[in-house]
Image: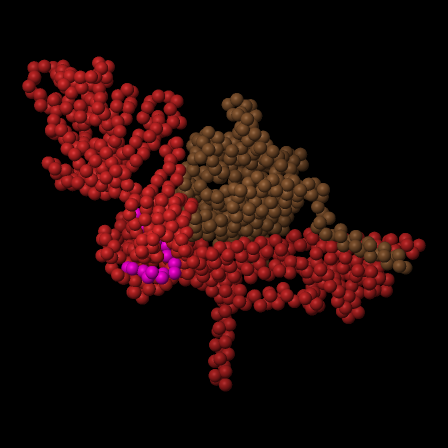
């Protein structure tokens, strides 16, 4: 006895739980809760380096927010739990309602129960017709059939009931939409590397936090399996090199995913519009297997990924892949000494001999397209663009920790008839560059300027009697006669003016040297994204079914009509009833039209019949 | 006796066939259907070699939708033909070497920029007319308001059509559907919202709601003026590689058609709330007299939200398909995507509350009205305040 009671209690508790899970209140609350939780991730930039967050929030709040998972909200357990609850709630509704709906859909309209009693339907009207019941029911059937209701006649105690419905499959819309949501949530979870998450939770997999070690030194625990069913990783490949792994960023570290093939980047290419805006990013890649056989060779472009055996390769980004730069360095404190040759790759650092400085080569850019009016002051140049050619950026850092950033153009830039070597300088990051213009001589280098500087410095004090102005001009003439005798007088004047203003600019120059670019061997590196998502097809089918379901739900409402006819002494009593699963307002209009039609046929027919009789 | 039976069955057949929808199709509808069929046939014949699978799917969808919409709403047939022929005229003028500099028609009417300026003017005037209509309830003013709105819609779409061609002129590699920056999508938004408003107006025969819907369109038009004259965003510019996709011309316009429907629903919600207040406080107010019954507005709201929801779902899915091609994942939790999800969840909640719980009336009107802020944030706010992959619409 006691057992039975407890069993009952358990049963009713389960029932309660199911009722709760399937309740509309829970579903709507979860929808709203999910919407609110989703806002967090849009307000706070997700998956940034942890240092950024520390700077933003301070160490205390950084730790709190980290523990709540605000830096990657959509992958936290609590967010997934809300989604899980929503899926559970949807499933409960679906499982509870589907059998009833299918039954209702498939059952013939034979059942003349309360559902088809016209007096109990939402819309109902009583008409009396002078027609005999047989003719009247024929009329009713004709009107209903014409409007798509597929009428059926039933005998019922002394009278006739005509029932019909259209949009019988409206409930299918409910089943399809809800099933689709469950299916694609499940598929999305499958794609979201659930097995890897589980392994991480169990400790079998641990992300590597050191980004500066070669692949061979990465801990074995950060390596994922070859047979991982789904992954999404990125990798940067310099031109001419290849990779067989991609990296997945996790929290503050990364995991290594081996690929079933080797990706070699043959060439990377950027195409430009005439405005200098990039038009296309193209990676020419070759896929090899382990034996070195070429599997596939293709171009990967933005919006045009390459698919090979379920693995997709995308063009994601690009950086300099370590271009070789050849430079010349001139010393301002010893301008006569001639230039020193330097050579290094982008990303490398060089110690400058004879100074306390170290150069860090930051980047190289092959083209610099700018609006023409940024350089030339001529009007009408507003819509033209010119290419200033290659430039490179470096940071000069001295032992005393002062540093400055430089952006240096390789080719001289001509302005108002004089060519200049142009270099941007800034001592604080993020501030705009201050531009230094050093005039270039007939051979296109700043050698002549350095000679002049040297001459000025070496002769300081020798001719102290001369006025400064005369001395400066006189020295200039000497230098020009010696090193550039071919210069015209006009060119000399222009050059002299430019040289003087450059010397004045140099007062604020932060380092004692200038580095020019004399040659380069350009090399790109392409950022590729590699994904394997076997469940994507399922997701797309889920989407298609969802749209179909919504369409059925909204635009094919189920409408039921039921007309009871009862013979009277001098005619027939007709009770018309109707109900719709959606849009009662619209249905009421249709119902009114139908009733008006019924009234007119039932009564006009009557007139004609009387006439015939007469 | 036999003849009377035959008579009766004949009249029954007549009664039956009168109810069929086929009989509601007019000769004009048949012409519409035939014209579209021939056009699609010609398109397939000409472009057969260039089309791939999805282009056929899209063409087929356009065909079915245009046939259905034209038959459902006859005014659309005339509007569509006007837009297509005027846009083709503009394109033809360009093709014979005319330019806005030497052709009066192109300069003042048909070039994309001029079309949009006309649209702005007409829609602003229409807004004024609708407000006057609300105060006076003069049938004449009402007709003028509707006419001005139609003029604005037509000019907007003609302008967009010609601009599409203009993006190719002088720089063939720039060519794109004009839905790539804030200026262009605002034009789409203004024209689409006004068009859908006209549809609901004719469907529900209620002109007074224009005084609620059109002011927002006017605000968007005002924003467009600012973007044009202060930001110069009307200039045609090339598009970045990520936007060069087949899916763009489907995803973006469909999103804005969905936004248009949501916006209309929100403003009808506002009308409902104010009308309800006016009726309750004695019933003598302007709103109580001018606005349609609460039932009609409630129904209009749910119709607009239902259509918006369907289109929004399709547009989001198309966006996901595109994202899978461009960014390597169909869902990246980008702020725009997340806000689209929030909008979707919001309206999913609305529709559940309405159909399953049977909620109606004032609370649903409030829900619909408040959703305007969510939709506006998704459309504009995300681009203005948050950064992410969708940052094309920046100022």
Residue visible at 45% across and 61% down?
A186
Q: Is residue A233 magenta?
A: yes
Task: Look at the image and name its color scheme.
Answer: by chain
Considering only vertical position in the picture, is A179 above or below A16? above
Give x and y (percent) for residue B114. Answer: 53, 29
Q: Which part of the image, by quadrant, shows the N terminus of chain B?
A: bottom right
Looking at the image, which is closer to me, A589 or A426? A426
For the record, the magenta segment spans: A222-237
x%, y% of residue A258? 32, 57
State the residue lying farthest toward the left: A462
**Residue B284, relative to residue A593: is it above or below?**
above
Residue A158 percent across, percent down from the top left: 79, 69
Q: Is residue B213 magenta?
A: no
Q: Can you say whether A385 is above or below A106 in the image? A: above
The answer to which quarter of the image holds residue B35 is top right
* A24 horizontally vs A38: left or right: right
Q: At 89% across and 55% down in the image, what residue appears?
A: A610
Which image quarter is the C terminus of chain B in?
A: top left
Chain drawn in brown: B
Above or below: residue A264 compared with residue A25: above
Residue at 53% across, 57% down: A545
Q: Residue at x 41, y 61 (%)?
A: A190
Chain in red colour: A
Q: Position of residue B69 (x, y in %)?
A: 62, 45
């Amino acid at each position: 006895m006691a057992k039975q009671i407890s069993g009952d209690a358990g049963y009713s508790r389960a029932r309660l739980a199911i009722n709760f899970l399937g309740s509309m209140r829970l579903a709507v609350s979860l929808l709203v809760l999910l919407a609110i939780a989703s806002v967090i991730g849009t307000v706070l930039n997700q998956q940034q380096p942890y240092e950024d967050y520390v700077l933003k929030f301070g160490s205390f709040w950084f730790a709190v927010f980290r523990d709540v998972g605000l830096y990657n909200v959509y992958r936290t357990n609590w967010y997934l739990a809300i989604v899980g609850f929503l899926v559970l709630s949807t499933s409960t509704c679906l499982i509870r309602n589907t059998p009833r709906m299918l039954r209702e859909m498939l059952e013939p309209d034979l059942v003349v129960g309360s559902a088809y009693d016209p007096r109990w339907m939402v819309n109902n009207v009583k008409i009396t017709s002078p027609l005999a019941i047989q003719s009247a029911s024929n009329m009713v059937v004709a009107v209903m059939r014409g409007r798509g209701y597929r009428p059926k006649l039933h005998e019922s105690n002394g009278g006739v009931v005509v029932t019909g419905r259209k949009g019988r499959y409206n409930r299918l819309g409910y089943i399809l939409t809800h099933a689709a949501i469950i299916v694609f949530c499940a598929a999305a979870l499958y794609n979201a590397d659930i097995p890897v998450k589980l392994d991480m939770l169990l400790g079998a997999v641990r992300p590597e936090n050191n980004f500066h070690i070669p692949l061979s030194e990465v801990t074995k625990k950060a390596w994922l399996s070859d047979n991982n069913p789904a992954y999404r990783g990125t990798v940067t490949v310099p031109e001419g090199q290849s990779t067989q792994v991609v990296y997945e960023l996790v929290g503050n570290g990364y995991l290594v995913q081996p690929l079933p093939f080797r990706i070699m980047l043959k060439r990377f290419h950027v195409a430009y519009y005439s405005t200098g805006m990039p038009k296309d990013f193209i990676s020419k890649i070759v896929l090899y297997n382990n034996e070195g056989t070429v599997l596939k060779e293709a171009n990967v472009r933005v919006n045009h990924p390459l698919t090979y055996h379920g693995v997709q390769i995308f063009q994601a980004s690009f950086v300099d892949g370590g271009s070789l730069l050849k430079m010349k360095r001139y010393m301002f404190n010893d301008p006569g000494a001639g230039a020193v040759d330097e050579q290094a790759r982008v990303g490398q650092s060089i110690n400058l001999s004879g100074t306390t400085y170290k150069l860090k080569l930051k980047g190289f850019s092959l083209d610099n397209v700018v609006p023409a009016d940024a350089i030339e002051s001529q009007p009408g140049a507003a819509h033209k663009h010119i290419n200033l050619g290659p430039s490179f950026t470096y940071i000069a850092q001295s032992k005393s920790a002062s540093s400055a950033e430089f952006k240096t153009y390789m080719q001289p830039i001509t302005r108002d008839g004089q060519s200049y070597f142009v270099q941007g300088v800034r001592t604080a990051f993020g501030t705009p560059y201050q531009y230094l213009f050093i005039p270039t001589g007939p051979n296109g280098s700043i050698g002549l300027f350095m000679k002049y500087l040297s001459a000025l410095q070496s002769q300081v004090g020798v001719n102290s009697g001369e006025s400064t102005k005369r001395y400066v001009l006189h020295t200039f003439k000497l230098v020009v006669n010696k090193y550039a005798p071919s210069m015209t007088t006009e060119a000399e004047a222009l050059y002299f003016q430019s040289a003087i203003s450059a010397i004045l600019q140099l007062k604020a120059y932060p380092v004692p040297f200038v580095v020019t670019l004399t040659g380069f061997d350009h090399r790109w590196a392409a950022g590729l994204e590699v994904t394997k998502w076997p469940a994507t097809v399922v997701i797309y089918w889920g989407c298609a079914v969802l749209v179909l379901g919504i369409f059925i739900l909204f635009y094919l409402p189920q409408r039921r009509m039921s007309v009871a006819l009862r013979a009277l002494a001098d005619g027939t009593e007709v009770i018309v009833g109707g109900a719709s699963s959606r849009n009662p307002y619209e249905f009421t209009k249709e119902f009114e039209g139908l009733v008006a039609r019924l009234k007119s046929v039932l009564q006009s027919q009557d007139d004609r019949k009387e006439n015939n009789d007469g | 006796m036999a003849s009377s039976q035959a008579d009766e069955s004949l009249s029954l057949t007549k009664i039956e066939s009168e109810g069929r929808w086929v009989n509601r199709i007019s000769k004009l509808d048949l012409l519409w259907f035939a014209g579209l069929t021939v056009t699609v046939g010609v398109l397939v014949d000409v472009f057969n070699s260039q089309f791939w699978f999805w282009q056929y799917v899209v063409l087929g969808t356009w065909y079915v939708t245009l046939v259905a919409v034209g038959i459902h709403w006859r005014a659309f047939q005339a509007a569509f033909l006007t837009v297509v022929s005027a846009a083709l005229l503009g394109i033809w003028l360009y093709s014979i070497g005319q330019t806005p500099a030497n052709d009066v028609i192109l300069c003042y009417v048909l070039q994309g920029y001029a079309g949009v300026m006309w649209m702005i003017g007409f829609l602003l005037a229409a807004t004024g007319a609708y407000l006057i209509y609300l105060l006076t309830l003069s049938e004449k003013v009402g007709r003028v308001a509707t006419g001005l709105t139609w003029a604005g819609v037509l000019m907007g779409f003609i302008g967009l059509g010609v601009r599409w061609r203009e993006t190719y002129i002088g720089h063939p590699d720039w060519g794109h559907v004009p839905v790539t920056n804030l200026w262009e999508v605002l034009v789409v938004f203004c024209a689409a919202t006004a068009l859908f408003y006209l549809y609901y107006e004719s469907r529900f025969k209620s002109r007074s709601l224009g005084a609620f819907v059109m002011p927002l369109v006017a605000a968007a038009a005002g924003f467009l003026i600012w973007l044009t004259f202060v930001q110069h965003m009307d200039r045609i510019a090339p598009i970045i590689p990520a936007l060069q996709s087949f899916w763009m011309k489907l995803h973006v316009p469909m999103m804005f058609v969905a936004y248009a429907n949501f916006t209309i629903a929100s403003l009808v919600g506002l009308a409902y709330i104010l009308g309800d207040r006016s009726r309750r406080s004695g019933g003598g107010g302007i709103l109580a007299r001018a606005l349609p019954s609460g039932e009609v507005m409630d129904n209009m709201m749910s119709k607009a939200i239902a259509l918006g929801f369907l289109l929004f779902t399709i547009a989001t899915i198309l966006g996901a398909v595109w994202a899978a091609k461009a960014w390597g994942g169909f869902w990246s939790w980008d702020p725009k995507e997340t806000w689209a999800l929030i909008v979707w969840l919001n309206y999913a909640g609305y529709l559940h509350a309405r159909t399953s719980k049977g909620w109606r009336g004032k609370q649903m009107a409030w829900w619909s009205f408040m959703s305007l802020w969510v939709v506006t944030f998704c459309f504009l706010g995300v681009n203005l305040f948050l950064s992410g992959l969708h940052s094309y619409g920046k100022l």
